[in-house]
């Protein structure tokens, strides 16, 4: 059973999300919160596997919630889907960089939302290759001068290369085909890179790659 926590300052939004989640046999809502501080309290009393998180809330916003999750070993396993009225904007990009597994629009079809919960609960990233490429093209130019990324100097040459490929939006299978490796080998390198860079999700690895200037020139 996938345990879901709803975090949004609009009650009608939470009601709609609850209806969609609770009608599925393999998931249930274990709590609701209308601000970030309340969300963290709920998590400590009612553990969840997936959090559906609004970014823009009064008081503690979604970005600060993500930072608290990353800093607390007991809460780090919680996977986060940003639920937003916007598409890719600075807030979404920062949320992915802070460890969110992906995002979905509030007006998405019900089937898309429940699929997103299942994908993220299984440990996968929610960003499609096309969305990843759009995100990179939108924000890469803001880091004309690469930023310092903790752990970057610990990556091997192959890990740096594959991290750059991840930022192109390719799947492990596509990267493996391009580099004449097995998908399992690529998956291992991606996992090691995430561990060394302290990335909580593949989406966060993409953001770190962009900031570090590891994006392939022709991605």
Image (tube, rainbow, N blue to C red):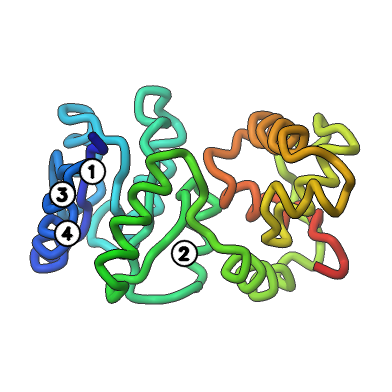
The residue carrying pointer 3 sits among few (fewer than 14), some (14 to 19) or many (20 or more) residues within 10 Å by Cα, namely many
Mark nearest the camera among 4 and 1 is 4
What residue is pinned by disc 4? 20
Mark 3: secondary structure: strand
* Cβ–Cβ under 8 Å for marks 3 and 1: no
Task: Please provide percent x and percent y for residue 103.
Answer: 42, 61
**Mark 4 or mark 2, earlier in chain:** 4
Q: Earlier in the sequence, mark 3 or mark 1?
A: 1
Bin the neighbour count of mark 4 within 10 Å (Cα to Cα): few under 14, some 14-19, many 20 and up. Answer: some
Q: Does residue 207 appear to the left or right of 149 in the view shown?
A: left
Alpha carbons under labels 4 and 1: distance apart: 11 Å
Q: Which mark is residue 92?
A: 2
Element type where label 1 sits in the image? strand
Q: Quadrant of residue 122?
A: top left
Q: Position of residue 130 (x, y in %)?
A: 61, 70
Q: Say which quadrant the N terminus sits in.
A: top left
Q: Residue at x 83, y 42 (%)?
A: 160
Q: Position of residue 99 (x, y in %)?
A: 50, 45
Q: CA distance from mark 3 to mark 1?
A: 12 Å
Single out the mark in the foreground, 1 or 2: 1
Measure the C-alpha gap from mark 2 to mark 3: 20 Å
Q: Residue at x 77, y 33 (%)?
A: 185
Instruction: Report the Cα–Cα distance between label 3 and label 4.
Output: 17 Å
Query: Is residue 211 in view from this perspective?
Result: no
| Residue beneath disc 1 | 4
Earlier residue among tags 3 and 4: 4
Q: Which residue is mark 3?
A: 33
Left or right: residue 213 compared with residue 192: right
């Amino acid at each position: 059973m996938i345990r879901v926590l709803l975090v949004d300052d609009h009650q009608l939004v939470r009601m709609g999300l609850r209806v969609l989640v609770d009608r599925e046999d393999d998931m249930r809502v274990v709590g609701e919160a209308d601000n970030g501080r309340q969300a963290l309290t709920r998590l400590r009393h009612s553990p969840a596997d997936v959090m559906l998180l609004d970014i823009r809330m009064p008081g503690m916003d979604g970005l600060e919630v993500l930072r608290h999750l990353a800093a607390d070993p007991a809460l780090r396993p919680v996977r986060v889907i940003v639920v937003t009225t916007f598409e890719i904007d600075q807030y979404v990009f920062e949320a992915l960089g802070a460890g969110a597994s992906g995002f979905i629009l509030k007006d998405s079809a019900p089937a898309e939302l429940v699929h997103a919960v299942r994908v993220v609960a299984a440990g996968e990233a929610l960003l499609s290759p096309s969305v990843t490429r759009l995100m990179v093209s939108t924000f890469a130019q803001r880091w004309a001068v690469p930023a310092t990324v903790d752990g970057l100097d610990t990556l091997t040459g192959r890990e740096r290369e594959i991290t750059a490929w991840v930022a192109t939006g390719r799947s492990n299978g596509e990267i493996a085909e391009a580099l004449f490796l097995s998908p399992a080998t690529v998956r291992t390198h991606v996992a090691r890179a995430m561990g060394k860079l302290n990335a909580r999700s593949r989406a966060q690895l993409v953001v770190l790659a962009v900031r570090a200037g590891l994006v392939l020139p022709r991605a």
